[in-house]
Amino acid sequence: EVMHQSPVNASIEHTLLVVLVQLVVIIAAARLAGLLFRKLGQPSVCGEIAAGLILGPSLLGRFFPEAAHRIFDPSVGPIFAIISQLGLILLMFLITGGNVIAAVLSTSLLVRRLCDDRERLRLDRLRGSR
């Protein structure tokens, strides 16, 4: 007996495929740029940052918008937001030497500071427009 695939499962599989393709592209570009920068005598993190800039809206999105949209489908943006938050928590966990409470507190303080900075910028813009 042949099992029919429900549209819900097909959607989940498609979303997973899109996310995995995006992760492969990001990781491969970061690794390649990191290796290139290391060969040039620069820290690999500089190459990884450059890869992020190249893949972002400033370059790939501006000069090749169809390719950027195809690779980085905006419909999975919320999933990447969750992945980035988990990555930030794991980074803080590593920085704090494995102390879970310190990692969560550090992350929440960082997020609060970022939100405060965004609010300050918004208020400065509002004040400047008067």
Image: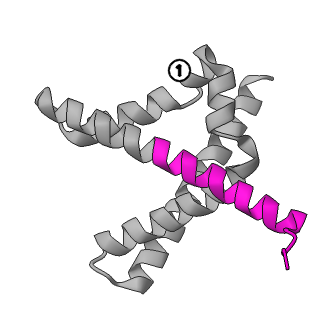
- Judge from the rendering whether residue 91 lies leftward or rightward of residue 5; answer left or right: left
Q: Residue at x 46, y 30 (%)?
A: 53
Residue 14 colored magenta? yes
Q: Quadrant of residue 6?
A: bottom right
Q: Position of residue 47 (x, y in %)?
A: 29, 34
Q: Residue at x 26, y 38 (%)?
A: 34
Q: Position of residue 35 (x, y in %)?
A: 22, 37
Q: Residue at x 14, y 26 (%)?
A: 40
Residue 58 shows in the view: no
* Vertical side of 94 occupied by 70: above or below: above
Q: Is 77 or 16 nearer to us in this picture?
A: 16
Residue 51 colored magenta? no
Q: Residue at x 64, y 54 (%)?
A: 17
Q: Quadrant of residue 126?
A: top right
Q: Is 11 or 105 nearer to us in this picture?
A: 11
Q: Which residues are magenta?
A: 1-25
* Vertical side of 9 occupied by 19: above or below: above
Q: Position of residue 117 (x, y in %)?
A: 58, 47
- Judge from the rendering whether residue 39 lies leftward or rightward of residue 71; answer left or right: left
Task: Look at mark 1 in the image and give the residue it sits on.
Answer: 59
Quarter placement of the N terminus:
bottom right
Q: Amino acid at mark 1?
A: Leu
